[in-house]
Image: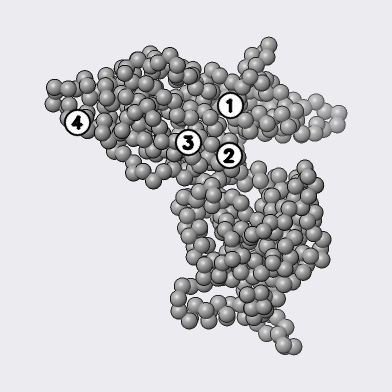
Amino acid sequence: MAQVLEFKLPDLGEGLTEAEIVRWLVSVGDVVAIDQPVVEVETAKAMVEVPCPYGGVVTARFGEEGTELPVGAPLLTVAVGAVESAGSEGAGSSGAAGSAGALGSTESSNESSGNVLVGYGTGAPAARRRRIRPAALAAPVPATVPAPAAAPAPTAAPAGAGASAAEPERQAGRAVAAEDMAQSGPVPVISPLVRRLAREHGLDLRKLTGSGPEGLILRADVESAMRTAEAPAAPGHVVAAAPASAASRGERIPLRGVRGAVADKLSRSRREIPDATCWVDADATELMAARASMNAAGGPKISLLALLARICTAALARHPELNSTVDMDAREIVRLPAVHLGFAAQTERGLVVPVVRDADSRSAESLSAEFGRLTEAARQGTLTPADLTGGTFTLNNYGVFGVDGSTPIINHPEAAMLGVGRIMPKPWVHQGELAVRQVVQLSLTFDHRVCDGGTAGGFLRYVADCVEHPAVLLRSL
């Protein structure tokens, strides 16, 4: 007898509360093996293939591609033991051998692997997808299978699945959080982030009209209500309601996934961190010459970013205040023992900040290799949550965009970010004479709570000295 088990969206780590379905890897009626990836989702940090801990037959999927689901919402249901039923029914016929083979490949059982966290998938090879006869899904569902939490309307199971197998789908959109249950009825919200955003801004969700499926209230609806509430009315005039068609003008791009995460983090940085910026121009001619000499000597190529990173770690060793974070609840500055260096990388999915672990203990060659690995993973969209979290200081080389300077926004909860502009020939006074030199602008944005301008200036001046005279760096090696 088949048992239908529900697989919910797991916690993908680092406090993530939701993910967007990018691509389904299985369909209703497919046979899946334990730990086989079944869906590709995009979180605020990375693209992740999610493996299913059960082996059996997919009876329902919850959510279309492009749908955003909260952690804990149903992803799909799997009929465990359905393949065994198919094999039994097919005994004595020409398809008996095939059914038995399917049973062996999926390893259907009541046990699960448990290997569904934390955004990395598992190493087990994906099983071949195979359609089975609808009759194989006709086994009854135990009454103990719980109804799933609120989720978008699922893809309908085949007619042969029976009313019991379809029950989770009929229940999918009905449950809401108990906090919203009152005399006026439930509020159509499934995202905890949307609830929190409305609560923080004093909005009554019952007064909002959702633009999602079946009136679901989305983050965009709450943000629109916030803008309406904040817009001042002209003195002496009554603001008339805009025509319904006015709201649809212009292109609307949802702030979700990587773009939404960047917006949230930068907004929080501006709200919470009293930042200040200082900058200096530096003659990078000798640094460029040193890099050329290193690469001409043979061996792996050393990137300019790796040399700048090596300079940063040496400067942080002299000024550890900037490798810290602020705990306002305890009213303490927490100086961090290791430098986990983030670097800004622009991808088709938006801006991401991969992190090089223990950058302070790496050589320029090791840094070059790690920068190369993480950059390629960023381009392919295969960075894991671990690759994108835990940074203590960020290096932002915006010179690749052909700009000279910028005022970086600190990557919360870090305390500082070094920005590097383009290196280009400019007139420069060198050894008392005007000459054409390779000049770069360096800018440091820092959290004024962790240090004063003297410390920030000392850090930036040391970085500039190492850029102008790379031999200065030998003192710290």
- How far apart marks 3 and 2 lie (CA) works out to 14 Å
Mark 2 lies on residue: 16
- How far apart marks 4 and 3 lie (CA) works out to 32 Å
Mark 1 lies on residue: 190
Q: Earlier in the sequence, mark 2 or mark 4?
A: 2
Residue 235, image x, y percentages? 86, 31
Q: Earlier in the sequence, mark 4 or mark 3?
A: 3
How packed is label 1: few (under 14 Cα within 10 Å), some, or many (20 or more)? many
Q: Earlier in the sequence, mark 3 or mark 2?
A: 2
How packed is label 3: few (under 14 Cα within 10 Å), some, or many (20 or more)? many
Q: Earlier in the sequence, mark 4 or mark 1?
A: 4
Tag in front: 4 or 1: 4
Amino acid type shown at disc 4: Gly
Number of marks in the image? 4
Amino acid type shown at disc 2: Leu
Q: Earlier in the sequence, mark 2 or mark 1?
A: 2
Tag in front: 3 or 2: 2
Amino acid type shown at disc 1: Ile
